[in-house]
Amino acid sequence: MEELEQIAAEIRACTACILHRGRTLAVPGEGPADATIVFVGEAPGFHEDQQGRPFVGQAGQFLEELLASIGLRRDQVYITNIVKCRPPGNRDPLPDEIAACSPYLDRQLALIRPKLVVTLGRFSMAHFLPRARISEVHGQPQRVGGIICYPMYHPAAALHQPALRRTVEEDFRRIPEVLAKAEGVAEYQPPPQPEQLRLF
């Protein structure tokens, strides 16, 4: 946990991209250092920026409802974002901002070593599956190197587009099944690149 806290301290002091100028608080992420599941959102919003904690607004409440639907509490999982500071006006994070920030995520994942990384939204998905379209791969686990990635729509998208809500709920309910199958292939090595393309 000390190493995770060290990364968090670096994030709070980070000036690697323009976003640090407008932040109230950076949002490194939170949860147990040995979490089985890591949820990766896109970027902090207004409430997250104020509190320095991920997913504390409306989308966070929905995420907690989703966790409860599979018998989990938020303190049992690790929750973070691909970008750790709030973009102005909640705009989408820019490529250079993601590039500056994503090494922190890679280091967090290397320490936590989760069995499953659930990406929430297309920006966090693109970190693992750069050529994928979320409409085509959501709810389908994909192995990327040593990580099993489970792409989902962002909970905020389901709040803005009620039609997506059922999709998000159904994808979420499959997480225990995905986890159960993931354990059987924990040490699997991905096939050479040409094989991997068939996943998309």
Image (tube, rainbow, N blue to C red):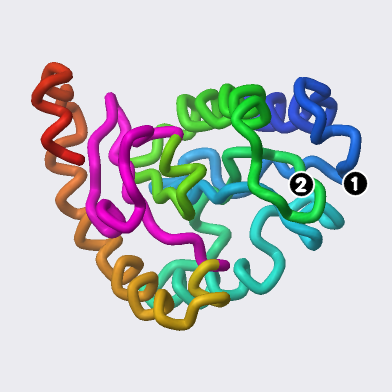
Residue at 45% across, 33% down: 127
**Mark 2: few/some/many CA within 10 Å (<14, 14-19, 20+):** many
For disc 1, the marked residue is 24
Above or below residue 161? Residue 154 is above
Q: Indicate the quadrant where residue 139 lies.
A: bottom left
Q: Indicate the quadrant where residue 145 lies.
A: top left
Callout in the foreground (2, 1): 2
Residue at 49% across, 73% down: 158
Say left or right for 24 vs 189. right
Say left or right for 139 vs 163. left
Identify residue type, mark 2. Arg
Q: Indicate the quadrant where residue 147 lies.
A: top left
> In front here: 137 or 29?
137
Circle 2/circle 1 CB separation < 8 Å: yes
Earlier in the chain: of badge 2 and badge 1, it is 1
Say left or right for 169 vs 7. left
For disc 2, the marked residue is 86
The magenta span reads: 127-156
Instruction: Provide residue 22's location: percent of width, then percent of height.
Output: 89, 41
Instruction: Provide residue 146's location: percent of width, then percent of height.
Output: 29, 27
Q: Give the SS element for disc 2.
A: loop
Marker disc for residue 57: none
Q: Is residue 151 magenta?
A: yes
Instruction: Provide residue 183's location: percent of width, then percent of height.
Output: 19, 43
